[in-house]
Amino acid sequence: MRVLVAISFLLSFPVFGQYSSLQSQYMFNPIALNSAATGSEEVMSAIGSFRAQWLGFEGAPTTGSITVHAPLKDMNSSIGAQLYADQIGVDNRTTLNALYSYRINMDNASLRFGISGGVSLIQSNYSELQVFASDDEVIASNTPVGVQPNFGIGAYYTAEKYFASFSIPALLGHRFEDNKFRSFSDVANYNFLLGGGYEFDLKNEMMLKPSVLMKFRANNRAQFDFNAKLKLNERFDVGLSYRTEEAVIGMFEAKITNQLFVMYSFGMPTSKIAKYSFGSHEIGVKYNFVYKSNTQGPRFAGW
């Protein structure tokens, strides 16, 4: 049985709007936020990650994802696929997206435009709720499974020492009415993501990589992630992030081999919820395959 916190989730998310998953270590997998980053590793790459938010609350959000992408040989195009599953209270969403980006080479830089498209399987398991009015027909049974389309767009500019990113991860929202899920598009409900960063060379081959991500939608106050990652040596990165009005996040990344990378982050809420939660945890693994294409131009190594 779900506790009352699950009901609060339902009240907060009465419709599946234009939704994008929350990520702390988006620098590890930028495709999670921007389809234009497809192929930016310049090799075939596979990334798996899992995030558990607000541990200590039954029904708190969890997200798991698998991403595979690669540049096409002898072309400026890249393709990929992403599978991710979200659960918030009794609401479940599983999404499969195809990814495409096109690269324009410039002097010492490159500009990528990307698009994603796929389908989401959506269901609300109301029967798992702990309720006080058992005769309420609205929550007497689970919703049918909805199969709904998804689309997203983005642009990604990278140079040797800096980058800029803009994306709208979801152009369609989904609402439940008349006992079925329906798609809708509402610009006022779009999540706009705008970010950028720079890489500073320090002593002893160390590097400081500050970046910022702004998330905003119409008629809502913008939220910012202020990040600073320090490259200690060839193998290890550590970092700290502050998400306005929400959390302070510690980040760690390790290069196990030239092809295998792992990451971990821990976020501690800065709101009153900190009294009741054990924080948020995120882990990930990335493997870059030997296959290479004839990609050109430098790229910032942050996102």
Image (cartoon, rainbow, N blue to C red):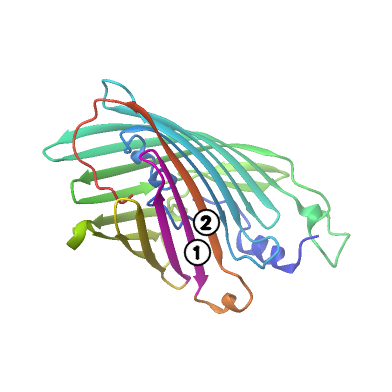
Image spot of residue 127 (x, y percent): 81, 53
Residue 235's label in the rendered image is none
Left or right of 230? Residue 19 is right
Q: Magenta region: which residues? A: 246-269
Magenta part, dominant SS: strand
| Mark 2 surroundings within 10 Å by alpha-carbon count, few (fewer than 14), some (14 through 19), many (20 or more) | many
Quick check: 263 above or below 270?
above
Front residue (pair 24, 119) = 24
- Looking at the rendered structure, the kind of residue marked 2 is Glu
- Secondary structure beneath disc 2? strand
Image spot of residue 224 (x, y percent): 37, 65
Q: Is residue 240 magenta?
A: no
Give the residue pinned by disc 2: 282
Q: Residue at x 18, y 33 (%)?
A: 105
Is disc 1 in contact with disc 2, using a CB cutoff of under 8 Å?
Answer: yes
Q: Quadrant of the N terminus?
A: bottom right
